[in-house]
Amino acid sequence: MAHSVRSSLAFLSAERLVMNTAYRFVYPFLPVIARGLGVPFEQAALLVSVRHFSGLATPAVSKLAGVGERQRRLIVTGIMLFIVGSAVTALTSVYVGALIGFALLGLAKPVFDVSSQSYVAARVPYERRARYLATFEFTWAGALLIGAPATGWLIASTDWRVPFIVFGVLSLAALAVTGRFIDADGPRVDQNGDHDRFTSSGRNFLLVAGLFALGSEMIIVVFGAWLENSFGLTVVALGGAAFLIGASELAGEGATFAFTDRIGKLRAVLAGLVVSGVGYALLVPASAHLGVGLAVLAIALFGFEFTIVSSIPLASELMPGSRTRYLAWMVVSMSLARGIGAAVAPILFDSFGIPGPALAALASVVVAAVVLVTGVSEETREIATSTSP
């Protein structure tokens, strides 16, 4: 018997909250992790870069484990990779071990994400899809609002490795009950038809996704160092700053839930690019003031979150006959861009402070907006299966 979309969405969202917390707490606490490993901040930032680059293997994993839109198999694969990555990271105290663990975590999350998004998209009509996928994306902000402050307290009480033990145990529990919430995979879907071919809009949107991901990464990878170096924030205070940023992202996800289906997915993505670009531009003069700087950063991240969450339902219909494959290639584009951003942003930060990454981020979203307007059209070629919510 098919499970309801709402029960499946609740399960997927709970596990994604765990994965997102493991993913996101690293940013504000990257200086702490660097000290724990005994390496410079720039070298610790490469952990983030490797984590992003490992996402480039998502299409290969999707092809091996989930060929024919086998979404539950991919969901299970993502959870298993995450458990192993958490264990490897928690049990090591040397840089090379952490590098391996971060690489596994970096592959686990996009595999889980794209299979979960595809699972939901296949069961919800396009005109209502943004609401359901926005609900799934609430876990991104929740990771900062709930996970980061709790993780900050845990690190302050123990050390940086303990949270990974908690993440692994929670995911092991989720793996044990997956079959109770996720439908079994049906017959293999033929992916050799015309609907499996990349359109010009599909190719161009992969570039757009990479550009706006690059812009965000330029800022987010250095904001912990900016707050610590410029304003002397403690570990616990960094968790509080993360809470503020998470609130702005929650607002972006809420705006997607409320407006994206109404105004159209493409228009929503463009609006998000404009808002985030304004935030990046204002961060340059505001960077010397803690309160104003955080407020401007919140605006930029609100715009980015509205952009990326609105982009998922749009992307889910650009190649509807092979959603998982297209979303996996979107992960490749964003992972490559984020990996570049994670490597370059600390260099710009060391040379120019936060204005350096901010101006680079602004340039990225301007180009993304131009490509979106000139090269992407919103097409509805829905072939989704019908399942009662």
Image (tube, grey):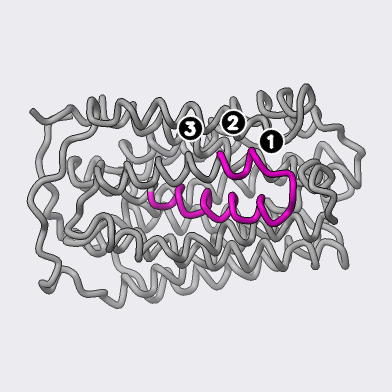
380 relative to 292, above or below: below
**Dot label at residue 165:** 2
Label 3 element class: helix
Q: In which quarter of the image is residue 125?
A: top left
Which image quarter is the C terminus in? top left
Q: Say which amino acid is labelled 3.
A: Leu
Q: In this view, does 40 lie above or below 329?
A: above
Task: State which quadrant residue 39 falls in.
Answer: bottom right
Residue contact between numbered discs 1 and 2, judged by CB atoms under 8 Å:
yes
For residue 133, side relative to residue 253 (left or right) = left
Please name whichever residue, 9 or 89, is drawn nearer the observer in this view of the structure: 89
Amino acid tagged 1: Arg
Q: Where is residue 287 in the image (x, y as percent from the top left)?
A: 83, 50
Per the rendered image, the range of residues in magenta is 87-111
Question: The disc labelled 2 sits on which kind of residue?
Answer: Ile
Instruction: From the image, tell me which residue sits under label 1.
Output: 161
Q: Distance between the residues labelled 1 and 2?
A: 7 Å
Task: Measuring from the top left, give residue 384's x and y in whole percent.
Answer: 14, 49
